[in-house]
Image (cartoon, rainbow, N blue to C red):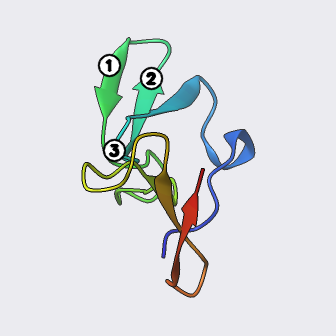
Amino acid sequence: MAAPLGRDTLPAHWSYGVCRDGRVFFINDETHSTTWLHPRTGEPVNSGHMIRSDLPRGWEEGFTAEGASYFIK
């Protein structure tokens, strides 16, 4: 699993957003460019939560640090 994501782990002038499917993207606030890769590690990051189309409306799937899935309403 990916390391915890927090503003303190990002370089100056970077922020992040999370897509509905749980993918995290990074924004360079100076150049207004985006990337799927963490600016420090160069690796993709998952928020740990995922909205799946096969779940009932309003439910999400989350993952523990050990990789076990759980469901959130």
Which residue sits at x=52%, y=60%?
48
Q: Are marks 2 and 3 in contact (CB under 8 Å)?
A: no
Q: Residues within 10 Å of mark 2 (few under 14, many from 20)?
A: some
Which circle's residue, 2 or 3, is located before the other in the chain?
Answer: 3
Look at label 2 and name its amino acid.
Asn
Front-most of residues 3 and 53: 53
Identify the residue position indicated by label 2 in the image: 28
Front-most of residues 54 and 36: 54
Q: Is residue 23 left or right of residue 58?
A: left
Residue 46, x across and y down, in percent:
43, 57
Which residue sits at x=32%, y=26%?
34
Residue 8, x across and y down, in percent:
74, 44
Look at label 3 and name its amino acid.
Asp
Look at label 1 and name its amino acid.
Ser
Checking the image for residue 55, the label placed there is: none
Residue 23, x across and y down, in percent:
36, 46
The outermost residue toward the left is 53
Which circle's residue, 2 or 1, is located before the other in the chain?
Answer: 2
Vertical comparison of 33 with 45: above or below: above
Which residue sits at x=43%, y=49%?
38
Question: Disc 1 and disc 3: Cα gap in Å?
Answer: 21 Å
The outermost residue toward the right is 8
Checking the image for residue 33, the label placed there is: 1
Q: Are marks 2 and 1 in contact (CB under 8 Å)?
A: yes
Residue 9, x across and y down, in percent:
66, 49
Label 3 residue SS: loop
Task: Write down the quadrant of residue 66 in the picture.
Answer: bottom right
Label 1 residue SS: strand
Identify the residue position indicated by label 3 in the image: 21
- Which label sits in the foreground, 2 or 3? 3
